[in-house]
Amino acid sequence: MLDIIKHSVMHQFDAALCMLNDCIEKCPDTHWGGNVAKYPFWQVAYHTLCFVDFYLATDGDTFQFRPDLHPNGWNELKDEYPSRRFEKDELRRYVIICRDRAREIIAAETAESLAGPSGIKFRKCPRLELHVYNLRHIQHHTGQLSAFLRRVDPSIDPEWFSHAWK
């Protein structure tokens, strides 16, 4: 049963990150700073990836910030606005980092770790539930980005991915 759970969760991470990446790829440069609700497109994508990365941590207290992607450490996640604008190439690279990290982390999960605490102090749930929460967070923001792209240009059609990374 553990293998099917890990396989299913990983496939859904792949699919969710593919869909996010597709939105990033298809966003015209002229709309990279366009508002999705009250935040620029790039910031919604960046926020999503920061929390994908963070929620994959087995211990939030020892999460390793990436100097190039989190120049202000914790403040990049907790402040309303990041320290700087992040560009498309940076976020495409961050998607790959998150995908590779998800594969590594989920492959290492055990029945005990998935049933144990999330590792994130403010997410009081089992680790498996944190993975599901993380997936819902990705899809929530990907839906926002997809709807934004369709509004600004009806010819943009973000793709639906079942589970395969293209």
Image: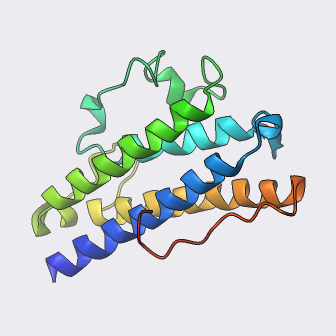
Q: How is the image coloured?
A: rainbow
Q: Residue 18's spot in the image, x, y percent?
A: 50, 59
Q: Position of residue 41 (x, y in %)?
A: 72, 41
Q: Of residues 37 and 123, which is closer to you in this image?
A: 37
**Quadrant position of the N terminus in the picture:** bottom left
Residue closer to the observer: 120 or 98: 98
Q: Does residue 136 lie above or below 162 as drawn? A: above
Seen at 52% across and 63% down, the residue is 136
Q: Residue at x 17, y 60 (%)?
A: 107
Q: Is residue 104 above or below residue 89?
A: below
**Location of residue 98 (image quadrant):** top left
> Does residue 114 appear left or right of residue 158 in this picture?
left
On the image, the x and y values in percent for residue 56 come to: 32, 48
The reply to whether residue 50 is visible in this rendering is: no
The count of marks equals 0
Tell me if 141 is positioned left or right of 2 in this view.
right
Q: Residue 15, how many percent across, how many down? A: 46, 66
Foreground residue among 123 and 132: 132
Q: Which corner quadrant holds the C terminus?
A: bottom left
Residue that protrudes farthest toward the bottom in the picture: 1
**Is residue 103 something that shows in the picture?**
yes
Q: In the image, is residue 44 above or below residue 106?
A: above
What residue is shown at x 28% (from left), y 53% (from top)?
A: 118
Q: Residue at x 65, y 29 (%)?
A: 80
From the viewer's perspective, is 43 left or right of 95?
Answer: right
Against 87, residue 136 (above or below) is: below
In the image, taking residue 160 as reference, residue 9 lies left or right, namely left
